Amino acid sequence: MKLNLHKFALLLVLFGLFLSACQPIDVPEDPFETTNTVQVTKVPATPIIPTATPTQTPVPDWFIPETELKDVKISFVHPWTGAAAKQIEILVDSFNQNNAWGIFAEAFAVGGAQQVFQQTEYALQAGEAPNVVIAPADELAYWKQHDQLLSLDDYLQDATYGMSADQQAAFYPLFWAQDVVNGERLGIPVFRSGRVLVYNQSWAKEMGYGTPPQTPLQLKNQTCAARDVILNDDVWQNNGVGGLIIDRHTYTALSWLVGFGIEDFPTDASLYQFDQPQTVETFDYLRELSDDVCAWTSRNPTPYEYFANREALMYAAEIEEIMTQQKAMQMAENEDAWSVIPFPAKNGEPALLVYGSSYGIIKNSLQQDLAAWLFIRWMNDPINQKQLAQKLDAFPVTNGLLEEFSSQRSAQWKAAVELLDNAKPAPSGAWWRVGRFVLPDAVYQIYQPNFTPDSYDNLLNLLDETIESLSNQPAAAGW
């Protein structure tokens, strides 16, 4: 599928508008016989050891000599805006000027992670696919399922074009493993994130809690205590706040479910079923928190001021939001000690759920496919990798950068990195491309006043049926 950059750029605009072995040598015996009567003692012949001819490794079908890569053009679609997008421009320009193969890359900033998927789908349907995308593993798995994405294993291990063992070992193991779906490597990690609870340590200590909650019951006790503090102050206008802010983020819902012990997610193409007793238990718990006003729904779309003003003891956030909360605390002149903690777990061993995006290669010509891989490899040179990671507030993907950034950033960011010692991977199968949109809608239902526990069976059946039905359908260009 040959790429035309100008056509692809036009499609992006239109979308915005339109939404051996050798055989051994046999040595015969010496046939010499004497007619004399004297017996001659025969000396055994020195055995001849055959010299093996080296077996040549077959050249893979995708292999292209370097000379055929000159002037190959590729496109690269990414989700970032602002400083990260600017850094991408700098890196792509450096690649174009300095890469040894004469490859030319062009970057397209499409404004968000979902836009990467939507516009790539639109381009695929129009026959003008990009070469390199940055997308989560579930979307890469979806494209692989439809034979539109390359497996990277052959490139990765190739003696000429691959990554060395040291380069591969530099990645944080959990992050590196997340892009292997159904036994095939579909991507190379770019960044990772996690959903945490931002937690006011000072306020909790004033209420008599010296340690963060480890179990759902402990969390309920602390959030309900914060509710009572607000109810018993002299300001009636703030009644109804104080504990945990409710949110409908996909990974908030999934983190609660993981904490209650739902079954592990498959690493192959299997569908996942949410109809489990643990799901019902999770939903019961969250509804009870809401009914008791220990968890509440905020009017403002962001939680930072509520937390800075002690109107929330805790709220769920991605680690990228840590720096935003720091600024809010400074503006409110709030000197409370605060940190980030994992969602509680019934077994008392909370685990951080990790997710993020990776480089993937959409199938095109052999030349473009190899050029796309070499671009990804170049982007993962340690210097280039660091320059991009510095513009993101997420987890960098290598051991060295995690350690380096932990020593440079805030105590809260360091605390988030420490949670990786007990982290779990988010789903990576193609079904999650649908599931992560449907699950929050199911959670939304449990907070509705007319929802009753006898509706759980219907809700969970509908949740699983919707995921299965939509997972078996091609994605629409707009979704």
Image: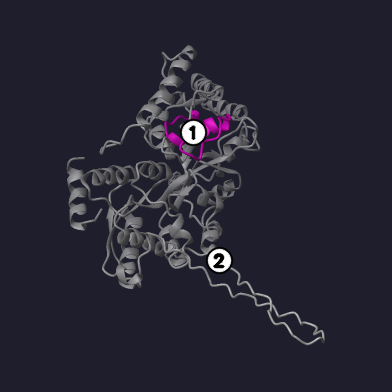
Residue 251 in the image: x percent, y percent?
46, 36
Which mark is drawn over residue 21?
2
User: Which element type, helix, strand or loop, lies under badge 2?
Assistant: loop
Q: Amino acid at mark 1?
A: Leu
Residue drawn at x 53%, y 46% as measured from the top left = 335
- The part of the chain drawn in magenta is 242-270
Residue drawn at x 51%, y 63% as measured from the top left = 167
Q: Residue furthest right?
A: 38
Up the image or down, 90 lies above or below 14; here it is: below
In the picture, measured across the screen, residue 232 lies left or right of residue 471, that is right
Residue 33 in the image: x percent, y percent?
72, 82
Up the image or down, 155 lies above or below 292; here it is: below
Q: Amino acid at mark 2?
A: Ala
Q: Nearer the viewer, residue 223 or 87?
A: 87
Q: Is-magenta flag for residue 252?
A: yes
Which mark is drawn over residue 254?
1
Q: Is-magenta flag for residue 325?
A: no
